[in-house]
Image (cartoon, helix red, strand yellow):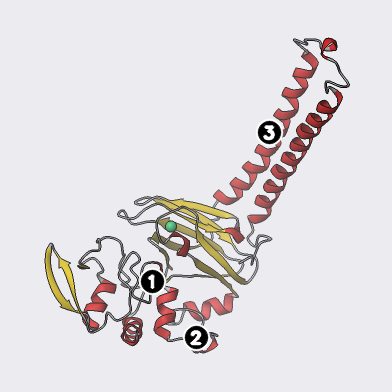
Amino acid sequence: MLNGIEGVSTASGSVNIAMYVVYGISIGVFSLVIGTMFYFAYKYSNKRYPRNKIKNIEHNTPLEVVWTIIPLILVMIMFYYGFSSLKALRTIPKNNMEVQVTGQMWSWKHKYPNGKITTDLYVPVGKNIKLDLTAPKNDVIHSYYIPAFRFKQDVVPGYTYYAWFNATKKGVYDIECAEYCGIGHSAMLAKVYVLSQADFDAWYNSDKKTPFSKKSNSKLTEHPGLTLIKNNGCTSCHSLGTNVLVGPGFKGIYGHKVKVKEGGTLKEVLVDDAYLKESIVEPNKKIVDGFSGGMMNSYKGVLSDDDIKVLIKYLKSL
Ligand SMILES: [Cu+2]
């Protein structure tokens, strides 16, 4: 969780400085105001300074000039550091790898120049990565936030935004959604894996979905279908039990008949391999009665046919 708290991108240094400058000035001003308040409360208490001694001071030009000039200088200092860190975040280096990011209720999708698609982000260390961020038009506002890289970018549906980073340290860092986007918001989490160039290339030029083979994964005892469900954010909307979240729960659905709406007509279908696959690839074709359509985006390309088979095998076991 606190991985990369020190800031592990080339731009994070200037953001840190801006934060410390603003923080330092705030502490200074706070101490001065509160300190003076206590001092005056003591000095001019009724006991030490009787009411008949109170004078009405109407004007003090030197004092007014001082309390205008000093705050102006402080604000300009904050502006300088704020602006230079903003510039570092907004000036995108020409030499970069471009990754398309889509934010949808409630997961992130990363598409690489060679067509690979992942839910977590995998990047080589020390390389400029440009992100083109968007959300589908029927979705809601999300905000792509990597605290360790000190940047955050709002994503309004239908528009494309950009951000960039150059990670300076190998490791695993959090990607969060920083815009309250509905019931699955708190589960809209992903990871960015900063790999060595060699590890990244080996994965990027292979046909593997992620750089980590199942064996090196510590979750050996976990059903691979469950791993897929967790890694693709399915549990944000579907419980593994019978609880209804945004969509139906997964438990016991396989082999049962369910009422669905297809193009406005209500019909009964059997939950089998073909129906489940269709629901993953074309989630809005048949909507289970009582639920609303347009809530789920297609996992076509995100999950391979083999992934879907494994996933369905797991659903059968529930
Ligand atoms: Cu979100």
- Is the residue 239 above or below the residue 134 in the image? below
Can residue 295 be seen in this snapshot?
yes
Count neighbours of disc 3 (C-alpha within 10 A) and say few if under 14, some if 14 to 19, many if 20 or more.
few
**Residue displayed at 65% across by 37% down:** 79
Residue at mark 2: C-beta within 8 A of ligand 1: no
Q: Is residue 94 left or right of residue 75?
A: left
- Is the residue 220 above or below the residue 106 in the image? below
Callout 2: SS: loop
Residue wearing tag 3: 75
Residue 155, given in percent of the width and then of the height, sits at 43, 52
Residue wearing tag 2: 213
Residue 194, given in percent of the width and then of the height, sits at 58, 71
Q: Closest to the observer: 284 or 251?
A: 251
Can residue 115 be seen in this snapshot?
no
Q: Of marks 3 and 1, which one's residue comes earlier in the chain?
A: 3
Marks 2 and 3: in contact by CB < 8 Å? Answer: no
Residue wearing tag 1: 234
